[in-house]
Amino acid sequence: MAWMLTVLTTVFVVYLIGFWSTRSFPTLRPYRFNQSSDVQLPEARQTTLHTTFASRNGLNAVVASALSEADRIEALLAWAHALWTPLPGRHANSTNPQTIVSRALNGERFSRSDFNTVLAHAMMAVGIPTRLVTLKTRDCTWRPLASHYTGIEYFDQDHFKWVWLDGSLGVRLLDDFLPLNALEIKNALLDQKLLITSPDRANVDVDDYLEGLSPYLDIVVAQPIGQSRHYALIPPQLKLHRRKWFIGARQYDVSCYSAQAFYASHPVHQLTHPERTRAIPIQRVRTVSGQPVSLANRSS
């Protein structure tokens, strides 16, 4: 009986520490980043994989009728989400988008997070600079579960900035009709700004979504599509080890402590309309309502 009480007490203490470290402590001691220059991230680039991927899946035809970049992304989202019905906890465990698509066409089902891999490469294949992003909790080195959340950041040529896109749910976050990247979302939450989602999704409640996303905004790890290395935007106040549990899976390759460097503009020569360097507000967007989608099935 004593051993059972010890086990239950240990589990309870671990739960309390985990809750405090992801919910209360980030609010009490929010991290900020350097504004000076730092490591320069390489540009996202197309490879032969993307040429083949676009050809085999008819991606150019998917976006042929799109009138704007937002329309192209929405068309690719619809295409990707039609590949399989999400199965929580069932990961593809592959970084090759064509492998995931082929397996899905053969009847396999995967988690929502795998939509990000397929969508990011599809966007890159049609000329939208993209990087896969993993958001991490500040205690991700030792946390066994729910230590990260995956998504996408793409370089929005209408707003000339990097923008967070949750490929699993197909939503962005806006502040005063301007789309935000992961760091801007964190700062907006710290400043208690009212954010809205775009586009409308009946199964996504903005308040529940932000509550679920907020613990993962302390560390941003990006892998530009077409590049092999992972770059981590780390608060200068935080010591983040490269490997989980110090000897486990690698969490990142290169550290970056400057928000300015991490979110620098994409090379102009890759943009389809580089003459646009000013933001174009997004109109006709409203806060969504409906049954919320839990992030618990997406984060671990």
Image: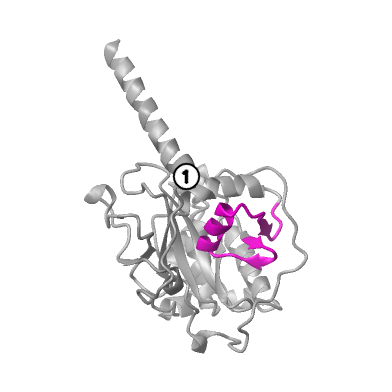
Image location of residue 64, percent across then percent down: 66, 79
Residue range highlighted in magenta: 173-201
- Number of residue marks: 1
Q: Is residue 46 above or below residue 256?
A: below
Instruction: Kindly identify the residue that appears in the image at 57 percent across and 45 percent down.
Output: 211
Q: Secondary structure at mark 1?
A: helix
Question: In x, y percent, where is residue 187?
Answer: 54, 58
Q: Is residue 251 above or below residue 160?
A: above
**Image quarter of residue 99:** bottom left
Please tell me whether residue 151 is drawn above or below residue 15 in the rendered image. Answer: below
Q: Quarter of the image for the N terminus: give it.
A: top left
The residue depicted at 39 percent of the width and 55 percent of the height is: 93
Residue 164 vs residue 123, the one in the foreground: 164
Where residue 111 appears, as percent x and y from the top left, is 50, 50
Q: Is residue 188 magenta?
A: yes
What residue is pinned by disc 1? Answer: 28
> Residue 36 appears at what percent x and percent y?
40, 73
Q: Amino acid at mark 1?
A: Leu
Q: Quadrant of residue 291?
A: top right
The answer to whether residue 204 is left or right of residue 183 is right
Tell which of 109 and 73 is nearer to you: 73
Instruction: Judge whether residue 125 is colored magenta.
Output: no
Residue appearing at x 44%, y 48% in the figure: 29
Residue 204 seen by the camera: no
Label 1: few (<14), some or many (≥20) within 10 Å?
A: few
Q: Which colour assignment does the render follow?
A: one colour
| Left or right of 228 on screen, residue 211 | right
In the orientation shown, which residue stands out farthest toward the right? 284
| Most distant residue in the top direction | 1
Q: At x 50% / y 59%, what residue is drawn? A: 151
Horizontal arrangement in the rendering, residue 7 relative to residue 157 (left or right): left
